[in-house]
Amino acid sequence: MENKKIMVITTTDNMIWQFLIPHIQDLQAMGNTVECVCSKTGFWFDELRDKYGFVMHDIGFKRNPINITNLKGYKKLKALQKERKFDLIYCQQPVGGLMGRLLGKKFKIPVIYTAHGFHFFKGCPLKNKLIYKPIEKYLSKYTDILITINEEDFLAAQKMKAKHVFKINGIGMDTNKIKFENFDKSEFRKSLGLNDDDYVILTVSELNWNKNYTTMLNTIKRLIETNKNVKFVSCGTGEWKDKISNHAKELGIENNCRFLGFRKDVAKIMQISNLFLHASHREGLTLSVMEAMYMGLPCVVSNVRGNRDLIDDGLGGFVVEAEDAPKFAEKINALISNNELAQKFGEYNKNKIQDYTIEKVKVQLREIYKNID
């Protein structure tokens, strides 16, 4: 695929900043012109434009597909297409996928859609199946290439009407962003309010309902009843920031919690952590879990798609039902009391995750692009 004028559509700028930079650069290296369309939600938009030189178009999409603002966004998108005359649409996320495929249908432009996690999934609310599944099935008719990143979505996509369906190993872990560093771990722990003998349980995720901080905090509460040195460290921001902080206070565990907000030094924090915890209700294929695996951490995760694609239960960590705080605590205690097992899990994860690097995913995508006329 070369000499194409490509419109990349995502719901938010953060999506591009976190996941798509190397892929856009790869498309450019192949001789394509790429411009990005998304909602400006933070510093990411300006950094993508100023630091990486991307052409950025701000259209205020909302994450809820049925929000009336998205109708206005679609009108702006049509005007942009008439002006810029793109000949390929590459869309991501549910709203980006909706906008992109409607645009492709109207202007008869080929569309590549990456599903980062269908809103319908095993165990989802009935309304998700009633609303989102028919929408995805309808839009698949106007999808030239549908790319999935986990087994459950891949099987679901094969029952749709897209011309081509593929599965890749996630969006790709950029090992240039996550790497081992030499530093004084004791001093770094101290800077985070941690002691050398603390057992550090890390999560890297947005502070929202889906990331299931309720179960994680209830798990920490159980753990510190028998081990006061357990510390919970969270990297991330989100709309539930105050709610989650207040819940920690209600549980009486605020002194064992460190809510660090958005961090650019996650790799360093992983190096001073003992275990990675991830209890989401829904995932596609979680980059933070991949990074924890790459850094050699044992992982205890919820039993949802994406998580169970990455973590082999009993080999790289443990997979637990999302609401089962007692079981999460039991499995974590098993690792606290058995450092040899924890190290074994970490080594297993380091080996497995080598197939999920950005280099491997780029190779997969270049083969997939050959299906575009």
Image: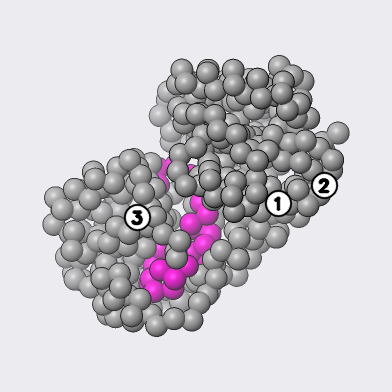
Counting residues from the start of the chain, the first of labels 2 and 1 encountered is: 1
- Look at label 1 and name its amino acid: Gln
- Residue 347 belongs to the span the image colors magenta: no
Q: Mark 2 points at which residue?
A: 31
**Which comes sooner in the sequence, label 3 or label 1?**
1
Residue at horizontal 70 percent and vertical 51 percent from the top: 25
Q: Which of marks 2 and 3 is nearer the N terminus?
A: 2
Position of 280 with respect to 14 (left or right) is left
Q: Give the residue at mark 1.
A: 25
Q: In this view, does 247 lie to the left or right of 164?
A: left
Q: Which residues, given as a range, are shown in magenta? A: 267-293
Q: Which of 274 and 336 is in front in this view?
A: 274
Residue 230, x across and y down, in percent: 25, 69
Q: Is residue 201 visible?
A: yes
Residue highlighted by disc 3: 261
The image quadrant that residue 148 belongs to is top right
SS of the residue under disc 1? helix
Q: Which amino acid does label 2 sit on?
A: Gly
